[in-house]
Image: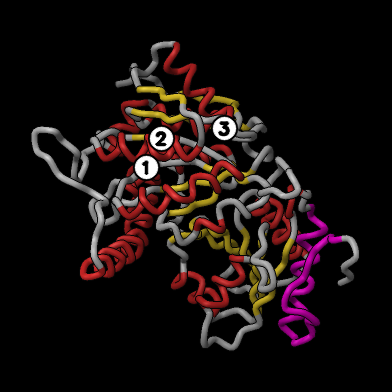
Amino acid sequence: MIQKIDAKKMVVTGDYAAAYGALLCDVDVVAAYPITPQTIIVEEFSTFVNDGITDAEFIMVESEHSAMSACIAAQAAGARTFTATSSQGLALMHEMLSIASALRLPIVMPVVNRTVAAPIGIWCEYNDTMPQRDSGWLQMSCEDNQEVLDMIIMAYKMGEHKDVLLPVMPALDAFILSHTVEPVDAPSSDEVLDFISHYKPHAILDPDNPMAIGTFTPPEYIQELRYQHHVAMNNARKVIKDVTKEFAQKFGRDYHGLIEAYKCDDAEVVLITMGTVTGTARDIVDEMRAKGKKVGLIKLRFYRPFPIEEIRKIAENVDAIGVYDRSISYGTGGPMFIETKNALYGMEKPVVNFLAGLGGRDVVKGDVEKMFEILLKAKEGEAKEEIYWINTRGVSI
């Protein structure tokens, strides 16, 4: 249990916001292993435990693999759990991620998006979370530190919903959010617990009522389990919309479900973004609108489940769609680009991929403006390529 905490305004890093969100959710078990730039998350939570604000069990483990293993065991025993990781740490966890989701354990784990080696880099890139898209977790991306705090809170309500029962992976950009301070409005602990309620496990490991989970299973049953998992991911679409609507009513901040459309109603071209680049893109939309150019923006908040219907609905009324990726599926394009093309199957619309910011390179206003300029050319059938590497040495556009 946690001490009663009043609502307050804070100026904090994204990492602190993630830890504080977990604190407000009254988590029972936290498994901790350090990796830059995530380390601050579990460090901050350790201070909450040390200061007696919470009596959560804080477990220091020997690897990220063990961190997820500890969360799986604790969650299966009826605890609300939390951990965090980044980059190579997430890669090391990969074996356990599918176990957590297949056992239908609603663990919440923020991931600070960071470059995956080699070469070694500690800056922002999405090539750590994108390869986990088929591990069965809900995946979301945050634009600012307020969203980090709020999404941690909503993640528990979404994942623990009886129609979902899946783990959730909120992502935040390395250093741009993790180590940068921003104003954040934090609700009280009473408000949060009234919103999410205390954890009520669907099934629990209990010595007095023995059961086995995740045991050896023959082919006669596994396919049905995969189908149930698939249904749960699809169920999450409605749950996400309902939870964000309820959150807006209670706390006054509306996150609009799986996506957030900006000036798309009469747009001729739209750009899909995710993470912190969205703020820069929103400014460019305003500037180009002032010049009479009908451009719009889709902020992709959830990558899993992917917002197929929402994107198709907007695409019906535009002439070209651009997709910004901060990761690469080698030889094909960005993962979001691939997903978007799949979502728009059968629609005769030019879809253009923009790769930028890999390895943590800054994506500045001129880069985003270039994306929109190419999209406006694509609308007229004048785009030369399907995939553009923006601000890349040796690549001319």
Please name the residue shown 55% across and 52% down the image: 129
Examine the rendered structure and indicate whether residue 380 appears above or below residue 105: below
Task: Give the residue at the far top of this rendering.
Answer: 51
Distance from the alpha carbon under mark 2 to that under mark 3: 13 Å
Query: Closest to the observer: 84 or 246?
Result: 84
The three-letter code of the residue at mark 3 reads Asp
Q: In which quadrant of the rendered image does the N terminus lie?
A: top left
Residue 336 spot, x, y in % from top left: 59, 66
Please name the residue shown 56% across and 80% down the image: 317
Examine the rendered structure and indicate whether residue 319 appears above or below residue 57: below
Distance from the alpha carbon under mark 3 to that under mark 1: 18 Å
Q: What stretch is highlighted in magenta?
A: 364-392
Determine whether the residue tagged by mark 3 lies in a helix, strand or loop.
Answer: helix
Q: Name the residue under label 2.
A: 82
Dots 3 and 1: beta carbons under 8 Å? no
Dots 2 and 1: beta carbons under 8 Å? yes
Q: Name the residue under label 3.
A: 15
Residue 372 spot, x, y in % from top left: 74, 69
Task: Give the residue at the far left of this rendering.
Answer: 208
Left or right relative to 90: residue 97: left
Q: In which quarter of the image is residue 164?
A: bottom left
